[in-house]
Image (cartoon, grey):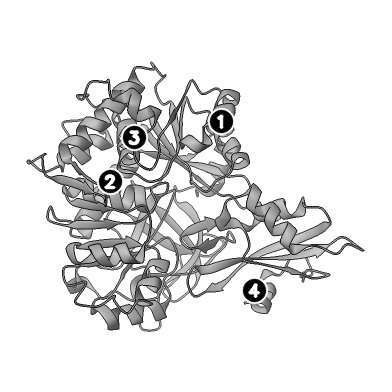
């Protein structure tokens, strides 16, 4: 990287010598490696021309497109901080993020421009651009007149590259601050560990507003100089069309469940595929076994989070160990993982405890939340993941980690992280509601489904249809409960804490 710790400098070093080769293919068109460099350079020049202070944030809520990926690369090249927002977030949710992060630039879909401009003005942004799923918009138009050459900004390892917001158990989202070193170190480790090659073809169907699609998948292909087939989302017909020319697929468990439900998904169709990776939610052992029987190779499950990128992985090289369903594998090189009891003492294999991690991939803390940052790190520098797990156990080797629960009450549905408290606060404000409890229950397609259990005020008859309509207009659809159950009293223990384990059993 010639002494420059900028993430883009690392990725660009992996681009192939032949920059005219196809880098990204969509159903509509292709983009060469030259175009990745040139388009990201034009956008970087546009942003640099705004004379923003160092470390300025660029908040982005747009549909998936190659241009959106190049916007991300442009921010990194220009030394700005990229802040992706889930496209499902509504205006009230986005207002919190803009208020907290105070981005200098906001990029949104054209159809959201009116309310986004209003929020941007309110929170001090100096510029709002649009970027649509087809790559058009005011950002593209403004960047077209810029120079197609740009000298990547010199960055230090600890300079901030991105902020990813994660929901909080108190209802307040936290911005995980990721540095160039965090992202670069993990990209290099995964490049080697998963055997990335220049002749790989990545079938990219993940969204690019979170770690899995934006960092793990995109960085892997870019650093390897490998082609990406770029689809906006999972579409079974498109996936089956492109699988014969692909070698790597990353998905959430839902992808594999839906592929297995289609008789056209066969071993012959996947003859070129060398690696199927699953993450962002637990993969059911049944899905793992069915997939291996159908396709002839096991899915590789791994474990990571917004604050750390990837932490553990089942082996790619089967000579170094099996891929074991129900586990998330071994600690990645340079990453340390330990399982401890509530007092911080390390536990023996087979014992269940709190998962803690450290390494160059682990974030520095939460944006403007120093107290929360201190709470989440131990005195000796380990990050408390909030997950509960164990090493080994039964026939599982002692160096394989299994995640058995989540101490922070997280629900993962279709790959999206959902914290019940945020939804409970919304429900409790609805007319006639006394209190509520939100739980996750097993779902064959999404992994978990959100279910709300609600207690009405005395004498009130709740209209659950009206409640669902109110939630759909006020929060992202993936957070809206699949079911609402009305009961007269929530089960509580002697300390007054709601016993969600009883509710999960009752409504599973």
Q: Earlier in the sequence, mark 2 or mark 3?
A: 3
Q: Nearer the viewer, residue 392 or 278?
A: 278
Few, some or many residues within 10 Å of mark 3 (<14, 14–19, 20+): many
> Which residue has dot 3 on it?
71
User: Image check: 355 left or right of 2?
Assistant: right
Alpha carbon distance from label 2 to label 4: 39 Å
Disc number for residue 504: 4
Find the distance from the CA under tag 1 to the CA under tag 3. 21 Å
Give yes or no for contact between labels 2 and 1 (Cβ–Cβ under 8 Å).
no
Q: In the rendered view, tell whether residue 380 sits above or below residue 411.
A: above
The Cα atoms of the two marked residues, 2 and 3, are separated by: 22 Å
The percent position of residue 177, horizontal first and vertical second, equals: 44, 39
Nearer the observer, disc 2 or disc 4?
Answer: 4
Disc nearer the start of the sequence (1/3): 3
Image quarter of the C terminus: bottom right
Residue 185 got which mark?
2
Quarter of the rendering containing residue 258: bottom left
Crowd rating for badge 4 (residues with CA inside 10 Å; few <14, some 14–19, many 20+): some
**Above or below, 363 relative to 233:** above
Comparing 179 with 476, the one in front is: 476
Crowding at mark 2 (Cα within 10 Å: few <14, some 14-19, many 20+): many
The location of residue 158, given as percent across then percent down, is 35, 34
Q: Nearer the viewer, residue 476 or 406?
A: 476
Tell me if residue 438 can be seen: yes
Mark found first going from the N terminus, 3 or 4: 3
């Amino acid at each position: 990287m010639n002494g420059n710790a900028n993430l883009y400098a690392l990725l660009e070093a992996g681009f192939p010598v032949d920059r005219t080769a196809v880098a990204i293919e969509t159903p509509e068109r292709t983009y060469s490696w030259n175009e990745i460099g040139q388009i990201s350079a034009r956008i970087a020049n546009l942003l640099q021309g705004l004379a923003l202070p160092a470390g300025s944030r660029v908040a982005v809520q747009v549909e998936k497109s190659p241009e959106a990926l190049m916007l991300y690369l442009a921010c990194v090249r220009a030394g700005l901080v990229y802040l992706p927002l889930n496209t499902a977030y509504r205006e009230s949710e986005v207002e919190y993020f803009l208020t907290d992060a105070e981005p200098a630039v906001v990029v949104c879909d054209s159809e959201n421009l009116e309310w986004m401009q209003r929020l941007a003005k309110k929170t001090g942004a100096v510029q709002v651009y649009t970027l649509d799923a087809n790559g058009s918009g005011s950002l593209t138009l403004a960047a077209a007149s810029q120079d197609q050459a740009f000298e990547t900004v010199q960055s230090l390892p600890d300079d901030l590259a991105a902020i990813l917001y994660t929901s909080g158990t108190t209802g307040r989202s936290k911005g995980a601050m990721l540095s160039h070193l965090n992202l670069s170190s993990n990209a290099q480790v995964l490049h080697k560990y998963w055997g990335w090659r220049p002749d790989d073809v990545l079938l990219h169907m993940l969204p690019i507003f979170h770690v899995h699609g934006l960092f793990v998948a995109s960085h892997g292909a870019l650093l390897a100089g490998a082609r990406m087939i770029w689809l906006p989302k999972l579409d079974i017909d498109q996936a089956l069309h492109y699988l014969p020319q692909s070698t790597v697929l990353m998905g959430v468990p839902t992808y594999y469940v839906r592929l297995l439900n289609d008789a056209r998904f066969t071993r012959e169709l996947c003859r070129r595929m060398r690696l199927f990776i699953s993450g962002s939610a637990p993969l059911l052992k049944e899905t793992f076994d069915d997939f291996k029987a159908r396709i002839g190779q096991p899915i590789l499950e791994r474990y990571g989070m917004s604050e750390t990128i990837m932490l553990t992985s089942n082996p790619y090289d089967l000579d170094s160990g099996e891929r074991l369903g129900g586990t998330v594998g071994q600690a990645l090189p340079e990453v340390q993982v330990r399982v401890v009891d509530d007092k911080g003492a390390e536990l023996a294999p087979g014992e269940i405890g709190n998962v803690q991690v450290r390494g160059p991939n682990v974030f520095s803390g939460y944006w403007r939340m120093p107290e929360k940052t201190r709470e989440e790190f131990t005195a000796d520098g380990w990050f408390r993941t909030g997950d509960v797990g164990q090493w080994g156990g039964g026939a599982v080797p002692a160096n394989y980690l299994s995640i058995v629960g989540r101490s922070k009450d997280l629900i993962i549905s279709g790959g999206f992280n959902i914290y019940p408290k945020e939804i409970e606060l919304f429900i409790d404000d609805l007319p006639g509601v006394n209190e509520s409890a939100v739980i996750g229950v097993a779902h064959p397609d999404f992994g978990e489904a959100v279910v709300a259990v609600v207690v009405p005020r005395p004498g009130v008859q709740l209209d659950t249809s009206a409640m669902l309509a109110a939630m759909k207009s006020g929060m992202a659809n993936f957070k809206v409960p699949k079911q609402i159950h009305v009961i007269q009293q929530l089960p509580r223990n002697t300390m007054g804490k709601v016993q969600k384990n009883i509710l999960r059993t009752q409504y599973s």
